[in-house]
């Protein structure tokens, strides 16, 4: 059994004070929850507030982005070492908004992934097709390319903890969710591509999350699919009660 990862991607929302208020309200709601891994991805500026606030709890904290170099003249960027020095354990890589608005390519994703693994950060690599690609029946080709290039030149013994988030771009922030069947179909494509590259045994252990308009109402149907090993939640993770309901998907 793969332990599900339920993650909150707060994007460019919440000041440090607002992030702290979330944590204070959220922790008691999930205090007894051990079934899944729970991870919050706040904005960088909130990391020094959120990480100490979740200490000794069942909640971990990751960053939404990082640079692949250890240090250098890269104005506005942060390194993996800076993140781990704060106590970050996870990092999102190649979110579709990074690909779309900040020109991140599969090659950049691959460099960031290698850096995350070398720094013992759990990478959550995001992939997903645009609406026109789905309508043109190109979903499989897009997913195989993104996974193929994103994970290239990484050996199974190095890839360790990597997780992949399948986030169809047409479902992000739109209220349009992939049906559990559509999502599971995409997850099978991703798993088969990973099996080709890193072997079947590795692929069987790989966690593949679904993201795109996950809400308390649709979380149970999605997360009870055997192929779906967690969720990456944007909008519905901004409210503590709503995100707690998603975490407890089978128990409410
Ligand atoms: P959403 O965002 O839940 O608001 O659709 C998901 C994501 O972008 O990770």
Image: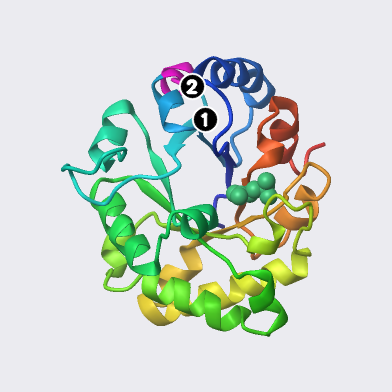
**Dot 2 crowding, Cα within 10 Å, few <14, some 14–19, many 20+:** some
Question: Cβ of disc 2 within 8 Å of ligand 1?
Answer: no
Judge from the rendering whether residue 130 lies leftward or rightward of residue 160; answer left or right.
right
Query: On residue 154, which mark appears?
Result: none
Residue 76, position as x, y percentages in the image: 31, 38
**Dot 1 crowding, Cα within 10 Å, few <14, some 14–19, many 20+:** many
Residue lying at 26% horizontally and 29% vertically, measured from the top left: 85
Earlier in the chain: of badge 2 and badge 1, it is 2
Residue 92, position as x, y percentages in the image: 45, 48
Q: Are marks 2 and 1 in contact (CB under 8 Å)?
A: yes
Residue 160, position as x, y percentages in the image: 34, 57
Whether residue 15 is situated above or below residue 158 in the rendered picture: above
* Front in this rendered view, residue 194 or 140: 140
* Front in this rendered view, residue 199 or 194: 194
Residue 113, position as x, y percentages in the image: 33, 57
Which picture quadrant has residue 84? top left
Judge from the rendering whether residue 115 lies leftward or rightward of residue 90; answer left or right.
left
Quadrant location of the C terminus in the rendered image = top right
Give the residues in magenta: 49-56
Q: Which residue is mark 1?
A: 59
Judge from the rendering whether residue 81 lies leftward or rightward of residue 38; answer left or right.
left
Judge from the rendering whether residue 113 lies leftward or rightward of residue 135; answer left or right.
left
Query: On residue 54, which mark appears?
Result: 2
Residue lying at 42% horizontally and 26% vertically, measured from the top left: 45
Q: Main secondary structure of the magenta part?
A: helix
* Front in this rendered view, residue 195 or 210: 210
Residue lying at 26% horizontally and 73% vertically, measured from the top left: 153
Instruction: Residue 247: tell me if it is visible.
Output: no
Instruction: Residue 199: tell me if it is visible.
Output: yes
């Amino acid at each position: 059994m793969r332990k599900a990862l339920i993650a909150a991607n707060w994007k460019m929302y919440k000041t440090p004070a607002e992030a702290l208020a979330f944590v204070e309200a959220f922790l008691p709601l999930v205090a007894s929850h051990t079934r899944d891994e729970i991870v919050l991805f706040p904005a960088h500026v909130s990391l020094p507030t959120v990480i100490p606030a979740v200490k000794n709890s069942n909640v971990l904290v990751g960053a939404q982005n990082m640079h692949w170099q250890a240090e250098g003249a890269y104005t506005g960027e942060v390194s993996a070492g800076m993140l781990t020095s704060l106590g970050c354990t996870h990092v999102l890589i190649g979110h579709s908004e990074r690909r779309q608005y900040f020109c991140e390519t599969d090659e950049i994703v691959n460099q960031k992934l290698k850096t995350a693994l070398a720094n013992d950060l759990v990478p959550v690599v995001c992939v997903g097709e645009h609406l026109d690609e789905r309508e043109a029946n190109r979903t499989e080709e897009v997913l195989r390319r993104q996974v193929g290039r994103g994970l290239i030149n990484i050996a199974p013994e190095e890839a360790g903890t990597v997780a992949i988030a399948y986030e169809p771009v047409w479902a992000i922030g739109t209220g349009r969710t992939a049906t559990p069947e559509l999502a599971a179909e995409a997850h099978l494509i991703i798993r088969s591509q990973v099996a080709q590259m890193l072997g079947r045994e590795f692929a069987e252990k790989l966690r593949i999350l679904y993201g795109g308009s996950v809400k308390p109402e649709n979380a149970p149907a999605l997360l009870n699919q055997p192929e779906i090993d967690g969720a990456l939640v944007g909008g519905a993770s901004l409210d503590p009660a709503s995100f707690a309901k998603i975490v407890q998907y089978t128990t409410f």
